Structure formats: C-alpha cells, structure tokens
Amino acid sequence: MQAKWGTCGDNGAWCGFNTLNIDSPGFENGEGVYIIWQKQGPVIKVGKGRIKDKIQEDRGTPEILQYPELLVTWATISSEYRSSVHSYLSNKLKPKIPTNVTDASPVAVNLPWPY
C-alpha cells in the first residue's frame, strides 16, 4: 500500500511534534496513522485514529514529552486498512512507547523515510 506522508513547509521538511498546526485545513476530519520520532533517534510512538485528536492527546502525555526534538508525520488511511497498517508499522518500527495492536493482519505500507 502507498501512503502519502505529511510534511511541513514548501521544502517537504518534517513537522515538529509540538509546533505542527493541527488546526490548519486538512486535519479537521483526517483519519489514519501517524508516527512520532526523535530527530536523529528512535521512533517513539505509532498511532492511529482521528489524527488531529490523537496528536493533541499525545502532546499532553509526559511519557512522550520526555524525549527532546520530536517530529511527526501522518498518512490518511481508510478505516478498512487502518488497523492492519498500524500493525505493520508497529512491528516494523518498534516504537519506544508501544500501543495496542489489534490482531489485524499486517499490511505493508511505504515508510516515510529509508529504514
């Protein structure tokens, strides 16, 4: 499956986790998966759901905020494949903060960067 991963700015730079404007157009109803990682470091969390709400919730999570220089990207994924893509990303990226992965069969998706 091909995902279009979100970036910020005209140069396609990764978005700062705490500075991304989740109130901008495009986030209102966007649902899919997202990845939070530490700049030049490990993946911290792989999440799924309504992207705006989930990022807002994670911004208040001390377990995530303990890591400096956090970045985030997201991809809109239909509900039919969301749990399967989340399962694949969680297994592949091994985030520091694991999330509940359903028993959905993993569906491979392109990663936002070479891994």
Image (tube, rainbow, N blue to C red):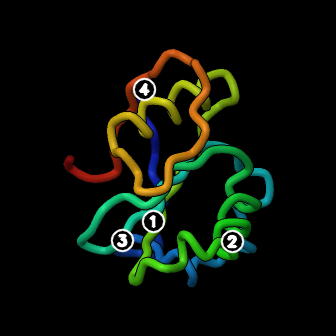
Q: Residue furthest top?
A: 105
Q: Earlier in the sequence, mark 4 or mark 1?
A: 4
Check residue 1 in the rendering and tell me which mark sits there, or answer none: 4
Check residue 7 in the rendering and tell me which mark sits there, or answer none: 1
What residue is pinned by disc 3? Answer: 38
Q: Nearer the viewer, residue 8 or 45?
A: 45
Q: Is residue 50 left or right of residue 5?
A: right
Q: Which of the two marks, 4 or 3, is nearer to us in this view?
A: 3
Q: Measure the alpha-carbon separation of dots 1 and 3.
A: 15 Å
Where residue 76 appears, as percent x and y from the top left, is 60, 43
Q: Is residue 22 left or right of residue 63?
A: right
Query: Is the residue under label 2 in contact with that under label 1 (CB below 8 Å)?
Result: no
Query: Is the residue under label 1 in contact with that under label 4 (CB below 8 Å)?
Result: no
Can residue 99 be seen by looking at this rendering?
yes
Where residue 35 appears, as percent x and y from the top left, is 47, 55
Q: Residue at x 39, y 82 (%)?
A: 69
